[in-house]
Image (spheres, rainbow, N blue to C red):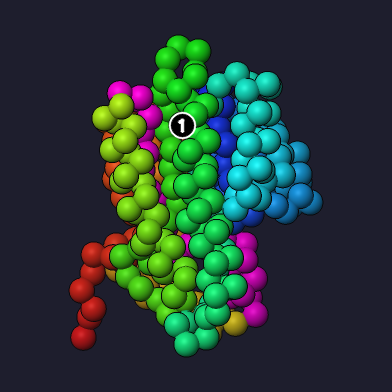
Amino acid sequence: MSKRMQDKVTIITGGASGIGEGMVRRFCAEGARVLLADVDTAAGEAVAAATGAHFVALDVSDPASWDALAERVRADYGRLDALLNNAGIVSGLDIEQVDLAAWDRLLSVNLTGVMLGCKMAIALMRDNARGSGGAIINTASTTSFLAIPDVAYTTSKAAVVGLTKSVAVHCATQGLNIRVNSLHPGATLTNILRTALAANPEIEPNLQRMSPMGRLGTVEEVAAMALFLASDEASFCTGGQYVVDGGTVVEHPRM
């Protein structure tokens, strides 16, 4: 590894599994000082022990939980270089099925949680020892561009794009040197999906046909894009949408 994040303090939410776990593993391998933030204590502590990350309990929908994390970062690290707002949930409910409780719960995690993370990160990054600066990466989805029936999920991921652009413009025009971008994975082979495929192997060809490249993405490929956006190599990239989907969102439906 090239150690592109050597000693950079990085928070990764939803880091206990899936794409978040892949991010934790890659950033630790690249020398980052990673705080793995999740509500799943057992899984989070296991990943942290395996990677050298530090686990912190975090409910991204709770402002008090973010405040506690900010105080820990100030006390233990004295700076923040990168935040990966990756935590998210699904509901599986369409517009006729969804109720207000399910709608509010999903948006509190997938959208409000991202906003709270951006707000906390900017406050910390303003106070970095060598002047303000850092990178924020908000995990969205290909459903930011192409809808699925899960109405709250689709809405939340589309809204993350607008949120990201607004925060990016604010930081740039304030001269903060804080870059903010959204990351858009397509169908990705996580451990959860592997389990589902083992139980239902007949669905794998359909999943592979979702992209013109004819396969699922890997968590490592998504983590690689997140690493680029967090690194100094992306120093002139802000407000952008970075897709890791094998071409799914650019292909016209085939006959």
Q: Position of residue 27 (x, y in %)?
A: 55, 35
Figure quadrant of the C terminus: bottom left
Read off the magenta span. 175-199
Q: Position of residue 201 (x, y in %)?
A: 57, 80
Q: Inspect the magenta stretch and tell me whether residue 166 lies in it.
A: no
Residue under the image location 32 percent in, 44 percent down: 166
Q: Residue furthest right?
A: 42
Residue 46 located left or right of residue 197: right
Q: Position of residue 157 (x, y in %)?
A: 41, 61
Q: Inspect the magenta stretch and tell me whether residue 190 lies in it.
A: yes
Q: Position of residue 13 (x, y in %)?
A: 58, 46
Of residue 64 and residue 252, the one placed in the foreground of this image is: 64
Which residue is the site of mark 1?
122
Which amino acid lies under the numbered mark 1 shown in the image of this protein? Ile
Residue under the image location 46 percent in, 31 percent down: 122
* Tally of marks: 1
Measured along the vertical axis of the image, is residue 104 above or below residue 31? Answer: below
Dot 1: element: helix
Measured along the vertical axis of the image, is residue 110 above or below residue 235? Answer: below
Mark 1 nearby-residue class (10 Å; few <14, some 14–19, many ≥20):
many
Residue under the image location 58 percent in, 73 percent down: 102
